[in-house]
Amino acid sequence: MRKRYVSFSLAAGSYCISVDNVMQILRRENLIQVPKAPPFVEGVLNLRGDILPVIDLRARLEVAPGDATGRPPGDTRKRRIIITRVGDRSYGLDVDEVREIVEIDDDGITTDAATMLGVRPDFVLGIARRDESVYVMLDLARVFASSRDVSPTLPGQA
């Protein structure tokens, strides 16, 4: 069975998440810093009155850092925040570049992700092949699994 995924780049890798989890894609702007947030929480975003935590996916997945800001040197105009929904919660994912929508057959996915070096296997659903491309398929439920780590408490909230 063929399913659709949003593909994006992070460091030197290609990743994808199910289209079903993606609500929209935004330019990276207007992030609000949150004191004492975990290192992988970039800040929060006010999206039409909803406050969403924005996750630095590089830090969360523990992939290779770029320059001193944690990003690759060069053009940062391609950086995007992918607004995702998992269960009843929405989150933003800060990625280097959103590439395209890809269709991947189930038989093109291998679940033997534990052998991938440099990627946390507990956040990976599998490795997908499509034509000559290879994508790391993320398990968003696990990426966001610990709500106390991912959702910082804002001033005035208990």
Image (cartoon, rainbow, N blue to C red):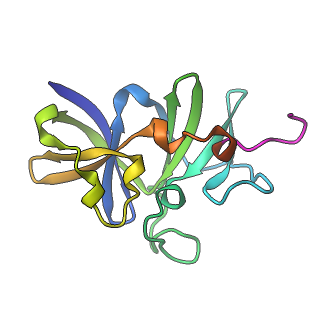
Residue 14 quadrant: bottom left
Q: Is residue 110 left or right of residue 123?
A: left
Q: Quadrant of residue 78?
A: bottom left
Q: Viewed as shown, does residue 99 lie left or right of 48?
A: left
Work out which quarter of the rendered image holds the C terminus and state it: top right
Residue drawn 62% across the image and 49% down it: 29
What's the residue at 40%, 40% (across, down)? 139
Q: At which x and y percent is residue 63?
A: 43, 65
Above-or-below relation of 97 to 23 = below
**Quarter that holds the N terminus:** top left
Magenta range = 151-158
| The stretch drawn in magenta includes residue 157 | yes
In the rendered image, residue 91, in percent from the top left (x then y), is placed at 57, 37
Magenta stretch contains residue 6: no
User: Which secondary structure is most common in the magenta stretch?
Assistant: loop
Considering only vertical position in the picture, is 90 above or below 142? above
Q: Residue at x 86, y 34 (%)?
A: 157
Instruction: Name the residue furthest right.
Output: 156
